[in-house]
Amino acid sequence: MPHPLAHQAAAHLATIRQHWAELLLAIETPPADVWPPRQLTHTLRPDDPLDVTDRAPLVLRQHPAPLNLDALDTGLAIERAVFDLADTLAAAVQRAALDDPRRWTYRSPTDPGSRAYGLHWAALYVEGRVLDEDTEQGIEAPFTPLPEHLLHEAHRVAEQAAARLLRTLGLDQRTTPVPDRPCPWCRGELLLHTGPDEAPSVTCSTGPRCTAPVPRTPAGRRVWEWHALPALVAALDVVEQHEEAPPVAA
């Protein structure tokens, strides 16, 4: 049975893969404000889908004019960390034949090796090593079980990389005041709640006195869950347009 840290490391690697396309899109997009939530405005565009399998790794590309330097720095750091980790694990446990497609190939001065296949392949390779996949064929196995000290190292790298990615995308666990957007029903402060494994939600700080037509939390605050957020965005836009409209002449 795999070590508990192995499952945790695999989960962090899955988080990186899941949000990698969004990070690539963020590099090409000016930094977003807190409001509206990124998931409502910063999704893959149906008219311009982003296929991460067709994108060269960030460390192998030129970046003449990125629109979001923080996202680019995060992407470069994560790629380098996962690529280097794959090198380390391969050196310790890999004994696959040169023509085995499961093999991790090191870079050379003239060839990027397996790094050319990008972050997804590297993350899947590392996940296979921490879960001790393909180690049960005895002397013919392409990999040997991962030593515990390298499992701890893989867990550390994957955890830090996933946390940085989520933080850069604003998807880490946080509660953020919605700037300059009071509740349309009571003018109370709105708070945006995000987390890595949950859809964003918004609560009104006024409490039970707020008359917004949405349910309440156990603490008595009105809450807009994910499905209700578009209606809240629309209501806030109406209020903003009304406040910006010029007075009507008598």
Image: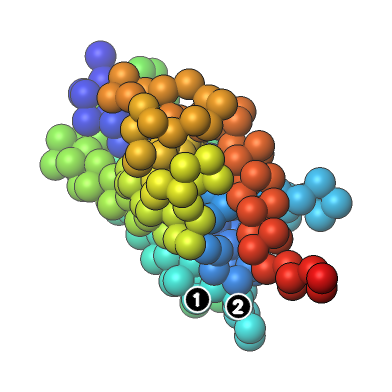
**What is the number of callouts on the image?**
2
What SS does tag 1 mark? helix
What SS does tag 2 mark? loop
- The answer to which image quadrant residue 198 occupies is top left
Q: Is 60 rendered above or below residue 9?
A: below
Q: Is residue 228 visible?
A: yes
Q: Which mark is residue 69?
A: 1
Say which amino acid is labelled 1: Leu
Q: Residues within 10 Å of mark 2 (few under 14, many from 20)?
A: some
Residue found at the very far right of the displayed protein: 47
Q: Residues within 10 Å of mark 1 (few under 14, many from 20)?
A: some
Q: Is residue 98 visible?
A: no
Q: Is 54 rendered above or below residue 155?
A: below
- Residue at x 55% of width, y 63% of height: 32
Say which amino acid is labelled 2: Pro
What colouring style does the render use? rainbow
- Residue at x 31% of width, y 36% of height: 9
List x then y, in percent, for residue 247: 74, 70
Residue found at the very far left of the displayed protein: 149
Which residue, given by chain and number where applicable, does mark 2 sit on? 66
Task: Report whether 153 appears left or right of 15.
Answer: left
Q: Are marks 1 and 2 in contact (CB under 8 Å)?
A: yes
Q: Quadrant of the N terminus?
A: top left
Q: Is 216 rendered above or below residue 154?
A: above
Q: Quadrant of the C terminus?
A: bottom right
Residue found at the very far bottom of the displayed protein: 64
Q: Nearer the viewer, residue 217 or 117?
A: 217
List x then y, in percent, for residue 174: 33, 46
Q: Which mark is residue 143?
A: none
List x then y, in percent, for residue 142: 42, 32
Measured in 3D between alpha carbons, the distance from the residue under mark 1 to the one under mark 2, in whole angstroms, is 6 Å
